[in-house]
Image: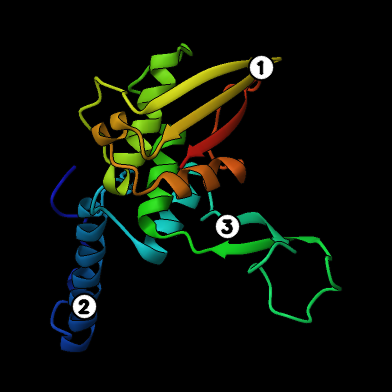
């Protein structure tokens, strides 16, 4: 792209009018600033340190059609066994299960990992187990949505359960877990549970975190 936009100019009859000339100079200066911003902002690029906050949300919504996701972490709380509840909260020998939902704030880092999962084309378009494992590792270890050296997938287990079911298991405490960073394992599971990560239409994916 050209380094400068087309300048606005005065007709010859107004060249000696200081006020009008000052207005045009100011206008051209503002246009140059806006043009420089467009040149350097790298609008389509969201990975790494490019763009963030409200600007990231605006750009991604306009270019990729995706808004910042809202994630809810659901878990079942069992009350009844000794030391799981305060006294006098249930009848003696009572038992109760409740579902607890926690809202998860999606940081720029997590949002970019989700975007990379959904829009990264480098793995090709043919679904295979290595294809899926590479995407899992990239989400877990690709800080701010960046790509990673991704030729080994130890620590990620993929099993087919029938009728299009796929179970991804991350062995958090196993010996093989040392080969990958599992800091984002809980958020990866939440992203799948909230259906934020695109998969082939037939695939019904569940994520299991082994203790």
- C-beta proximity under 8 Å, tags 2 and 3: no
Q: Residue at x 25, y 73 (%)?
A: 27
Q: Which residue is mark 1?
A: 164
| Residue 32 vertical placement versus 128 (above, below) | below
Q: Residue at x 18, y 80 (%)?
A: 21
- C-beta proximity under 8 Å, tags 1 and 2: no
Seen in the image, is 20 located left or right of residue 82?
Answer: left
Q: Observer-nearest residue: 148 or 95? A: 95
Q: On the image, which quarter does residue 90 sit in?
A: bottom right
Q: Which mark is residue 70?
A: 3
Q: On the image, which quarter does residue 17 sit in?
A: bottom left
Image coords of residue 68 (percent x, y): 51, 56
- The quarter of the rendered structure image containing the N terminus is top left
| Front position among marks 2 and 3 | 3
Q: Which mark is residue 200?
A: none
Q: Residue at x 60, y 29 (%)?
A: 205
């Amino acid at each position: 792209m050209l380094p400068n936009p087309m300048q606005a100019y005065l007709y010859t009859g107004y060249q000696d009018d200081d006020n009008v000339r000052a207005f045009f100079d100011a206008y051209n200066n503002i246009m140059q600033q806006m043009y420089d911003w467009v040149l350097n902002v790298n609008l389509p690029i969201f990975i790494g340190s490019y763009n963030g906050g409200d600007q990231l949300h605006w750009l991604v919504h306009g270019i990729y059609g995706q808004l910042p996701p809202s994630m809810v972490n659901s878990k079942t709380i069992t009350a009844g066994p000794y030391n799981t509840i305060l006294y006098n909260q249930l009848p003696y020998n009572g038992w109760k299960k409740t579902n607890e939902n926690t809202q998860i704030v999606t940081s720029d880092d997590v949002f970019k990992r989700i975007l990379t999962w959904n829009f990264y084309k480098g793995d090709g378009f043919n679904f295979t187990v290595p294809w899926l494992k590479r995407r899992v590792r990239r989400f877990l270890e690709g800080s701010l949505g960046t790509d990673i050296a991704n030729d080994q997938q130890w620590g990620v287990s993929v099993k087919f359960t029938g009728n299009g079911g796929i179970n991804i298991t991350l062995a958090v405490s196993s010996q093989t877990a040392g080969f990958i960073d599992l800091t984002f394992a809980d958020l990866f599971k939440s992203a799948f549970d909230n259906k934020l990560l695109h998969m082939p239409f037939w695939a019904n994916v569940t994520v299991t975190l082994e203790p």
